[in-house]
Amino acid sequence: MTVKWDDMGNIYARLDGVQNDKPPVVIGPHLDSVKKGGRFDGTLGVIAGLEVVRTIKKNGIKPRVPIVLVNFTNEEGARFEPSIMSSRVLSGKFKKSEVIQSTGQQGISFKEALEFGGFEGSDENRLKEAKAFLEFHQPFLQSRKSRTLTNGNSIFYNHEFDKTRNAILRGKPCRR
């Protein structure tokens, strides 16, 4: 896998596929958390993506299109406002020039934090398109906008983001 980060500090790990000129399947979403919130809700998505790639590589499978694992910076807004900052810059909903000046409680700007951490990458590395985006999230299994069916499957619908699809998750716990 190749790892890059963009000018917003978003980190991308890419597993090449057969058709590398096609948009990737992206799996994420973030590693940051919220105070008094689901500590591992975004982390679940990143770890799930790592497990997908590990299983693909272990079984010698070459995906048709690339798979990109993503860690969006400041997705929860725990340190800088607004939340969903970096992913919304990518989508064109926020302007980088505005959000980069956001200051956290310690008086440090988002721009200063990126520079200090060495994560002020290139805008050339930004995610530009995706065939699909898979986001596994802990709270959806517990939110009022989802429910667990009597057969143990979970249904998730109408999340807070702009474009979503209904999904029914089927399966059983993995035992080793």
Image (spheres, helix red, strand yellow):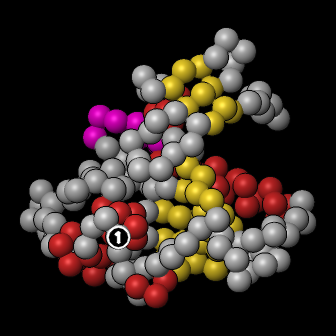
Q: Taking the image as drawn, is residue 144 in sight? A: yes
- Badge 1 is on which residue? 92
Residue 21: x and y in percent read: 71, 83
Residue 80: x and y in percent read: 21, 59
Residue 58: x and y in percent read: 85, 61
Q: Residue at x 26, y 75 (%)?
A: 96
Residue 37 shown in magenta: yes
For the C terminus, give its image quadrant. top right
Does the magenta stretch mainly form a helix, a strand or a loop?
loop
Category of crowding for the residue at label 1, using alpha-carbon neighbours closer than 10 angstroms: few (below 14), some (14–19), many (at least 20): few
163 to the left or right of 112: right
152 to the left or right of 129: right
Q: Is residue 171 above or below residue 152?
A: below
Residue at the limit of the structure toward the right, as seen here: 60
For the N terminus, give its image quadrant. bottom right
Q: Which stretch is magenta? A: 35-41
Q: Is residue 152 above or below residue 155?
A: above
Residue 71: x and y in percent read: 48, 62
Q: Residue at x 72, y 55 (%)?
A: 52
Q: Taking the image as drawn, is residue 44 in sight? A: no
Residue at the limit of the structure toward the left, as seen here: 107
Instruction: Inspect the image, locate mark 1, and give the three-letter code of the amino acid beneath it.
Output: Gly
44 to the left or right of 48: left
Residue 25 shown in magenta: no
Q: Residue at x 58, y 37 (%)?
A: 166
67 to the left or right of 4: right
Residue 85 occupies quadrant:
bottom left
Q: Is residue 41 above or below residue 88?
A: above
Q: Residue at x 41, y 87 (%)?
A: 122
SS state under label 1: loop
